[in-house]
Structures are given as C-alpha cells and as structure tokens.
Amino acid sequence: MAGLKRGIIAASVIAVLFGISCFTNRAATEILVKTQPDWYFLNLNSYKKFGQMLSVSFGFRRLFADFEYISFLQYYGNREHAHTGFKDLYRYIDDITDADPHFTFAYTYGGAALAFNLERYDEAISIIKKGLRYNPEFWQLRLYLGAIIYKELDDKDRYIGFLEDAARFSDRPAMIDRILGNIYEQYKTPDEAAAYWVKVYGETKDTETREHAYNRLLAIIEGGGLKNPGNIVRELEE
Amino acid sequence: MRRIAAVAEYIFKQSFRNKILNVLILFAVFSIGFSLVVSELAQEVEIKMIKDFGLFAINLFAFLTLALALTVQLFEENELKTINLIMVKPVARHEYIAGKYLGIVFTILMNVILMLAALMLILWLKGENPWELGLLLQAMYIFLGTAVLASTAMILSVLATSVPGCIIFLFFFYILGHLTVHLKNIASQLDNALFQAAADIIYYLLPNLELFNLKDKIYTPEGLFSPQYLLPVIAYAVFYPVLSLVIASLIFRKKEFF
C-alpha cells in the first residue's frame, strides 16, 4: 500500500514537472518562431545546402557563414579565376548570405566587387536588394544601390556622390576607397586625386589598400601632373 | 542539503584532479591561434569572426567538459567501483544524483566563465569593448543550455551500461536538441500525422537546446532579450533539469550495487 502511494506521488510529481516544462518550452518556442524570420528555419529545400543543415544541427550557423566568406575571399583573390571572369562570385555571396542574411559586410563587399570591378550590374543589384530585404534598417545599402544603378547608366556625378556618401561610414569595405580613388584619377585633377590617396594612406587599416594608395601616389608623382609634388612627399613622410 | 553539497564538492574536486580543466588550455590555444589566423584571412570582418568563433568554441568546450566529466564519473563508478564507497555512507540516492549534477554543472560554469574571460581578453587586445551585453548573455545561455543537457546526461548515466554508449547518446541528444524547433516547423508544413507525432515526441521529451542558441540570432535579438522570452527559458532551464533528475533518481533507486 505504501509502495503504491509512493508510486502515485512520484507519477504525479513527474506529470506536473513534465507539464510545466512542456508549457515553458512551448511559450519560449512561440516567441522564438515569432521573432525569427522565415530563413532561420530549415525547410524542405534545405537539404540542397548540406553545410547549412550541418551548421544548424550543431548550432554554429553564423560561423559557417564566416567560413563561406573566407572561401569567397580566397576565390576572389586567386588570379587563376580571373580568366573565367570570376563566374562563381555571385553564388559565393548568395551562399554566405543564405547562411547568415545579416552579414551586411558581405552584401556591400560583394555588391561593390560585382558592379565596380566586374561590371555585372544585374547580379550586384540582386545582391544589394537581397541585403535590403533582410536588413531594411541598414540603409547604407541604399547608397550602394544608387551608386550601382548610376554606374550602369554611366552618370558619373551621381554615382561618385553615392560612393562618397558610402565611404563616410567606418564599416565600409576598404575596396570602396580604392574604387573611389581610381575614379578620382580619371575625373579629377592629379592634385585632388593625390590628396585623396594621401588621406587614404594615412587613415586605412587595410594593408592592401594602404599599399595600393602608396603605389598610386608614386604613379601620380611620376606622371608629372602635380603642381607641387614636394608637398605630397612631405605629407607622406609625416 | 548539506549532503548534496558534499557530493557536489566531491565531484567538482574530482574534475580538478582528473584535469578536466585542461580543456581550458585547449580553448585558449584554439582561440588565440584562430584569432591570429583570422587577422590574416579576413581583416575587415576580423572582430565578427573572433566573436562567432569564440562563442562556438565556448559552446563546444562546454559540451566537451560535460562529456569528459561524465566519462570520468562513469568510469570511476563502474570500473573503480567508487560508487560502492558512497552508497555505504548516509547519502540518499536522490541526494547523490542531485549532488553529482550540481558538481558537473559547477565545473561547466567555471569553464564557461574562464573561457568567456579569455574571449573578452582577446577582444580587448583587439581594441574592442569586451563588456558587450549581447556577448555576456549569449555565454549565459550557452551555460544554461549545457546545464539542461547535463540533466539529460544524468538519466543516460544511470541507464548506461558502457561509457562509450552513454557519450554517443549524449552526442545525438545534442544534435537533436538543436533540431527540435526545425523538425517541428517542417512537420507543420507536411500533411503526415506520423511525422508530426514523431516531431512532437522529440520536441517535448528531448532538451530543446535551440532555445539557448542565441549566438545564431544575435542580429535579430529584439524579442529574445525581452523578459517575455527570458522568463519561460529560465523556467524551462529550471523545471526540465528537475524533471530529469527526478526520473534519474527513480531509476537509480532501483539499481543494485552489492
């Protein structure tokens, strides 16, 4: 009798605890489902991207996007792919932003590379629009969209304006500085272009951009178009 | 209560003696090495990558600490028969289970705090603010998730007849724990009652670790740092382990040692 009584008490305790844990689990899951966008959940098409399934299973989806980003940089940095026009570039950026749609740097970097280096405007616009769809509050993307659209229309005053606005943000890709400098060299005076490169040389943290700025300054000085090259050399030394 | 604390202290000290905290050295080497590699590979998103990797590593090593602590305990109980020494002492079986759980959870807590400190130090050395609330909350959630999984491990440890079997099941529970929400979401899209029932069973019985995986949702934290979310999650992190420990104690009570 005592054993039966103990059994009933134990079963009741388990039932109550199970009920509370089910209730709290459900309540938290409902908030989770409400706050997370559709892309967060695996769906019936997720099996197409095995890496994503794996990363979700182990709880490291954002880290997976980081690894995809490193693969993208290695792909884009490999000159052997230049002869194919980096045809897989769009797929790389799409994969990164599928794994982590809030990886805003991938949109700006990828969009700029596709539009200004490879002149693949449709793909660049598609990437930036995807970024805006998932990050409507990250309004710097609108500057990139404007710059790409006007670049395609060859309206240089407007696209330079958009790029200059984009370059004011500290989280811009360093590539924007290089693109803007190259444009200045084409459309502005050698003194203005040199002043810009000196500024980039002094401010950028990106070693590649710093080196690029230095080389461009040397090229401008050697080109002989500067009114006072001594000033530039002095500023560089400072 | 005093007896539970004594068992917890014994388990915690055993973890020290068995050098489970060496996992921390691995973490430090792993994290610092990775941050140096990342500096070279992805200069412009270096900080994001260090945070992502650091949190992933804290999660991974917290799980490894649990698996190691469990392995050591099972080995000592089953092979070295230390359990016999404890059973002859005036410690009730449910007290032993509760103490063992608390000992393992304290070991995990200490590891998580020290690993978080190492990550914060790396961020500080890179010129970032290490006292970011999101980072601290994510580490707390990692600890809570691992503590919930540890309670399931208690059931496995009293059921298991071999150490490898227990660890393999724990590993599967870890994966399924992250997939429960996703499985339920897929089941709701399918018109298959059997699949829906299976998804429901997994969802309610296994620990829902995805609730604690805030590191993958850091950019959409609006609702997740609110009290409406924190309260049910913390309640779940309390009641689910209590339920698991009650079940583990009931199974353990029926076990014979002599």
Image (cartoon, rainbow, N blue to C red):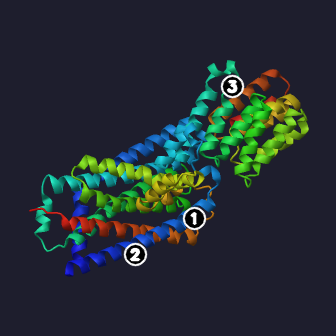
Look at label 3 and name its amino acid: Lys
| Whole-number angstrom distance, CA of label 2 to CA of label 3 | 59 Å
Give residue B199's position: percent from left, percent from top. Answer: 48, 55
Packing grade of label 2 (10 A; few <14, some 14-19, many >=20) is: some
Q: Helix, strand or loop at disc 3?
A: loop
In the picture, the quarter occupied by the C terminus of chain A is top right
Residue at point 85%, 30% (across, down): A190
Of marks 2 and 3, which one's residue comes earlier in the chain?
2
Disc ID at residue A30: 1
Say whether marks 3 and 1 touch (CB < 8 Å): no
Between tags 3 and 1, which lies in front?
1
Instruction: Tell me the subunit letter for badge 2.
Output: A
Q: Is residue A213 above or below residue B219?
A: above
Q: Which residue is mark 2?
A: A16
Q: Is residue A171 above or below residue A5?
A: above
Q: Could you say which is closer to the camera, residue B134 or residue B160?
A: B160
Look at label 2 and name its amino acid: Val
| Whole-number angstrom distance, CA of label 2 to CA of label 1 | 21 Å
